[in-house]
Structure formats: C-alpha cells, structure tokens
Image: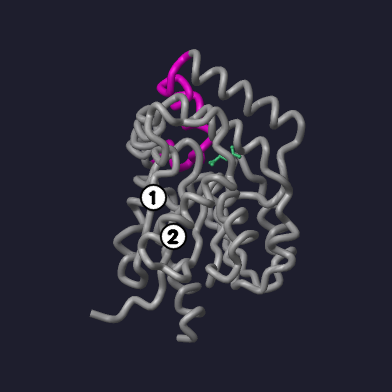
C-alpha cells in the first residue's frame, strides 16, 4: 500500500454533516489520510452556544488535529466549510499545506444576508430542522441533479433534518459575523484550488473567480451542470481536481 503523504481535512457546509463527503471518501482515501468531522455536533446538546462562530469552529478543528498529532493538513471546505477553512488559514498558515475552497466565498455577508441568517435561526428554532430541510434542498442542488438523481435530494433533506435546531441556529448566526477574508487569500502562498458548480444558485461564479484572482497560487475548476453541493453532484470531476492538487503538492 502506498504511503499516504497528505492529510486532508474535509469541512462540510451548512447545515450538513460529514456524510456530505460520502461520494468522495473512497477516491480520496486512496491518496490521503482523510478526516471529516461533524461541525454541528462538536458541542453536546446542552452546551450549544447561541452563536457558533467560524473562528470557534476553526479552533475545534485545530484541537482535533493536535489531538491526532497532525502537523500539516490540506484544508477542503465547502461553503460554510470554506469560511471555516479561511479562518483556520488566517490563524495557523504554518499548519496548512494546501487549501481547497468549494462553492464558497471569501467576502463577508451583506446587511440583507445577515438579516436572512437571523430569520433562518428563528425559523429553525420555531419550526424544527425538517422544515428548513425541505426549504433548502431546491437551493442546494441544481435542477439537472434534482431531475436526474432524485434520491440525492432525499439524502440531503434527511441530512439536514437530523441536525439539531440549536446548532443550525447558532451556525447561521455565526456565519453572519464572519469578516471579509479576501486578504487572507491575497497574502497566502499556499497552493489553492477553487471548485464550484456551473449552476450553483447560492454562490455566483463571480465569487469563485474573485477568489481565484486574489490567491496568487490558484487553480479554478468549474464543474458543468453541478449546483451548490458540487462534490456530491459531480463526484468524478470533484475527486479528480482534488487528487490533481494533492499530486501537485507531492511534486508528482
Ligand atoms: C453552506 O452551504 O454552507 C451555506 O450555503 C453557506 C451560506 O449560507 O453562506
């Protein structure tokens, strides 16, 4: 068995869990030691704070790396996971050997988006996770995916529905507080892969293009017909882009 040179930390989006990465695990475990934690389950049910900031989540990930003796990792964050990855890179660049930012953005929320985050928090606390799950799925998957792979919509809906409302509310409020971290990308010499879906309804292509322009050592991959969950919707293209980056890091 080849020695796995890289550690890969997969950071899921909102309000999901590690099973988001199910279509990627096998391919990526061939080339890296993979860790895929559940961000919304870090705190016990009684201890979920009112606000889960991106910095707090980055702290938790750093603690997991420390506990496992991992000195350097490749961060791979999708959407909210990308916000957390940038918060991590800002604090501990020496621990990051590469960064993969999927269907995400480096800029802060607009005032309108912040109000939407609070509305989502109040909604999930009042109505429960199932209601949020039903409302979100059409925005997360492209129309093409929903019509050709309807079972994926069910999988994603169930993934959201099983998250605790308190944790969803806290993460929604936390995302509203994140600052613009475009400067982190601009000042980083870390190899950077930016992946997005051609039909991502939540992150316009321009946000990925702007990150690719800001990061000095970047590659941009746009997956045809995929939506916001590009790793699930176009797993072959997604996996090969990640494997290519890992190979580049090894100098292969
Ligand atoms: C996510 O997928 O993590 C969210 O869409 C991120 C966001 O709402 O900004």
**Residue situated in front as seen by the camera: 157 or 148:** 157
Above or below — where is 226 with respect to 46? below
**Residue situated in front as seen by the camera: 77 or 212:** 77
**Residue situated in front as seen by the camera: 117 or 221:** 117
Q: Is residue 123 left or right of residue 162?
A: right
Q: Is residue 169 left or right of residue 216?
A: left
Above or below — where is 99 with respect to 170? below
Q: Is mark 1 within 8 Å of ligand 1?
A: no
At 61% across and 53% down in the image, what residue appears? 87
| Quadrant holding the C terminus | bottom left
Which residue matches tag 2? Answer: 9
Number of the label disc, if any, that sits on residue 20: none
> Which picture quadrant has residue 154?
top left
Above or below — where is 116 with respect to 99? above
Which percent across, then down, holds residue 19?
A: 34, 45
Which residue matches tag 1? Answer: 37
Tell me, yes or no, if residue 222 can be seen here.
no
Residue found farthest to the bottom: 252
Tell me, yes or no, if residue 19 can be seen here.
yes
Which percent across, then down, holds residue 37?
A: 39, 50
Which percent across, then down, holds residue 101?
A: 57, 57
At 47% across and 70% down in the image, what residue appears? 72
At 73% across and 56% down in the image, what residue appears? 182
Q: Is mark 2 within 8 Å of ligand 1?
A: no
Mark found first going from the N terminus, 2 or 1: 2
| Quadrant holding the N terminus | bottom left
The region drawn magenta spans: 127-148
Q: Is residue 114 left or right of residue 84?
A: right
Is there CB contact under 8 Å for labels 2 and 1? yes
**Residue situated in front as seen by the camera: 38 or 106:** 38
């Amino acid at each position: 068995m080849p020695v796995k040179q890289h550690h890969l930390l997969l950071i899921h989006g909102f309000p999901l869990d590690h099973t988001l990465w199910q279509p990627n695990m096998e391919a990526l475990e061939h080339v890296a030691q993979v860790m895929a934690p559940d961000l919304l389950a870090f705190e016990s049910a009684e201890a979920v704070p009112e606000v889960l900031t991106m910095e707090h989540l980055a702290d938790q990930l750093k603690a997991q790396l420390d506990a496992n003796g991992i000195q350097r990792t490749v961060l791979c964050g999708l959407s909210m996971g990308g916000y957390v990855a940038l918060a991590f890179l800002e604090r501990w660049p020496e621990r990051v050997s590469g960064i993969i930012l999927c269907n995400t953005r480096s800029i802060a929320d607009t005032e309108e988006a912040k109000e939407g985050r609070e509305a989502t928090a109040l909604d999930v606390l009042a109505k429960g996770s199932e209601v949020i799950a039903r409302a979100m799925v059409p925005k997360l998957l492209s129309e093409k995916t929903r019509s050709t792979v309807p079972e994926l919509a069910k999988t994603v809906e169930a993934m959201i529905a099983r998250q605790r409302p308190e944790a969803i509310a806290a993460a929604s409020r936390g995302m509203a507080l994140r600052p613009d971290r475009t400067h982190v990308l601009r000042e980083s010499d870390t190899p950077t892969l930016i992946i997005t879906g051609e039909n991502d309804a939540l992150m316009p292509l321009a946000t990925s293009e702007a990150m690719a322009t800001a990061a000095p050592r970047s590659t941009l991959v746009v997956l045809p017909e995929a939506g916001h969950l590009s790793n699930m919707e176009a797993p072959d293209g997604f996996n090969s882009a990640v494997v290519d980056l890992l190979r580049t890091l090894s100098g292969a």
